Image (tube, rainbow, N blue to C red):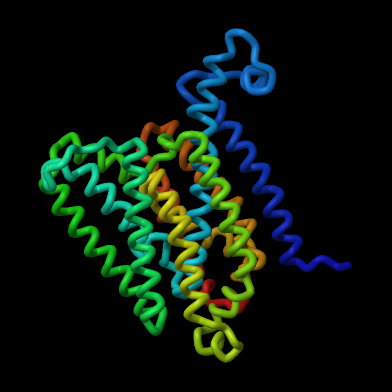
Amino acid sequence: MAVSPLLRKTMVYCLSGAVVLIVLFIIGILTGPSDFAPDQLFRALAHPQPGDEVVRAIILEARLPRAITAMASGAGLALCGLLMQSLFRNPLAGPSVLGITSGASLCVALLVLGQAALAWPAASSGGPAVVAAGILGAAAVLMLVMTASARLGNTTSLLLFGILLGHFVGAVESVLQHRAAATSLRSFVLWGMGRFTETPLPAALFLLVLTLAAFLVARRMAPALNLFMLGETYARSMGMHVRRFRMGVVALTGIVAGSITAWCGPVAFIGLAMPHVARLVLSTSDHRALAWPLAITGAAAGLLSDLLARWGSVPLNAVTSLIGAPIVILIIFRNGSFLRRTP
């Protein structure tokens, strides 16, 4: 049976991307203040001997969780970006467009900056309290956005609702930052720069499983996403329950983006840029073909960004912005209408 050109290109993309992903993952495990030879690493993990306890602890408690978190977060944010760009049919939409990440950021700000403004003990930028606050904030805003999605009649109104909600949250954060103590403000700013370093191994594995599950759900939704991109009116005429579909996309994006933001902070530009890269390389907007190539692209981008941030000793969001912003600008200038292609 003949293989279509798109399927052949997708297979080549996935295989080559998987090789790059494995190489980046191994480099991430080997790279750090203490250098290990590959044979020392594999021996400490597979057949530990006396004296390998330190190496094994460094790998399992620091480097492996960091690499898994970077990989899962990059893929998850890329998926959220694709879903938002398809839902709003807007190439500049990203995971933060609904205000989910803003909700997580607000609760973290209340916890970390609340010492002076709200007269309660301040928290550091790490630890389970900050993660719990981020999850709570993302969940609260997700419920609010889903309620708005059920009541609002069109996607444009939902987009405006998310943008205004983000501005409101930003204003509250500005007030809190203005009144915060210097140490608390520094902790919040560090959290806002993004990081893959504060996630323990169980949480990293949870993010990985969550991201894989989200891609499986998104792959099943691919025909509906293709249909929705042709317009809400056409989708309704073909029998789609548009409001239910929209709420499903919002819920999936909110859960994934909210969980990643709670653990890693508001990581910038990966969710916005990586869907464009996958579309450009495969020359298609068909969600059936984009799902798994996008997972590999996002995961590789997360690992690469983390490595560059580590090597350059710079904040993670500085790296993702320096890489992501030029990619988006270049693609938009090259072909501003690629998102509107018929699948």
Instruction: Report the residue at 36% width, 69% height from top.
Output: 145
Q: Residue at x 59, y 58 (%)?
A: 215
Which image quadrant for residue 280? bottom right
Residue pushed farthest top? 50
Residue at 50% x, 84% y is 232
Q: Nearer the viewer, residue 135 or 327?
A: 135
Q: Determine whether 224 is above or below 180 in the image.
A: below
- Quick one: quadrant of the C terminus? bottom right
Of all residues, the one furthest to the bottom in this rendering is 237
Q: Is residue 81 visible?
A: no
From the viewer's side, name the closer residue of 3 and 167: 167
Q: Residue at x 40, y 70 (%)?
A: 146
Whether residue 320 is situated above or below residue 31 in the rendered picture: below
**Residue 116 in view:** yes
- Residue 337: horizontal and vertical position, in percent? 50, 75
Please provide percent x and percent y for residue 87: 48, 73
283 or 58: nearer the viewer: 58
Q: From this view, report whether residue 172 is shown above or below residue 320.
A: below
Is residue 255 toward the left or the right of residue 205 in the image?
left
Residue that extends furthest to the right in the rendered view of this protein = 1
Q: Is residue 227 above or below residue 56?
A: below
Q: How many marks?
A: 0
Q: Is residue 286 left or right of residue 178?
A: right
Residue 4, horizontal then vertical, whole percent: 78, 68
Q: Position of residue 165 (x, y in %)?
A: 27, 66
- Horizontal side of 130 relative to 343 (left or right) equals left
- Name the quarter where the N terminus is drawn: bottom right
